[in-house]
Image (cartoon, grey):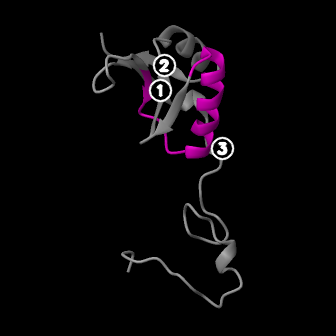
Amino acid sequence: MSDYELVYSDDPNFKKRCLKCGKFPCACPKSTDLKPNEHTLKVRLEKNARGGKTVTVIFELPNNEAYFKDLEKKLKALCGTGGTFKDGKIEIQGDHREKIKAYLEKAGFKVKLAGG
């Protein structure tokens, strides 16, 4: 049954459903559900398939998309560069491992630098 999307319904709550989880009321995890001191984030540097450009990647993130989209915006402002949140990873342009590590530790996360 999950192979199709419902197009029309006479249910008045149909348009109020969440676009991410599809439920009314929304069942998505809230940003307050995340306790930073219980999670370890890994930070690494990547160059592969990026035309030689260096990207700092934060991976193995807990499942809380709203919290990490907000965190991604704060990290971009901190580093003064571009970046994105996709596929459960935060990517920040350039080598900013030390800045990001210090910021995440200040926010309460445990941080490990991965890679060489």
Whether residues under marks 2 and 1 lie with C-beta atoms below 8 angstroms apart, the answer is yes
Tell me how far mark 2 sits from mark 1, CA to CA: 6 Å
Relative to 35, residue 48 above or below: above
Please identify the residue farthest to the bottom as the structure is shown. Answer: 10
Q: Nearer the viewer, residue 94 or 16?
A: 94
Return the residue at label 2.
Answer: 111
Where is residue 78? Give x, y as percent.
Answer: 65, 17
Q: How packed is label 2: few (under 14 Cα within 10 Å), some, or many (20 or more)?
A: some
Amino acid type assigned to the residue bearing label 2 in the image: Val
Return the residue at label 3.
Answer: 31
Tell me how far mark 3 sits from mark 1, CA to CA: 17 Å
Q: Which mark is residue 40?
A: 1
User: At x 43% / y 24%, what residue is drawn?
Assistant: 57
Where is residue 63? Give x, y as percent.
Answer: 50, 45
User: At x 36% / y 75%, what residue is drawn?
Assistant: 3
Magenta span contains residue 60: yes
Occupied quadrant, residue 1: bottom left
Occupied quadrant, residue 9: bottom right
Please identify the residue farthest to the front as the structure is shown. Answer: 51
Residues drawn in magenta: 56-81
3 vs 1, front mark: 3
Where is residue 50? Give x, y as percent.
Answer: 33, 25
Amino acid type assigned to the residue bearing label 3 in the image: Ser
User: At x 58% / y 27%, what residue is drawn?
Assistant: 37
Q: Of the residues under marks 3 and 1, which one precedes in the sequence?
A: 3
Task: Report the side of 37 relative to 42 (left or right).
Answer: right
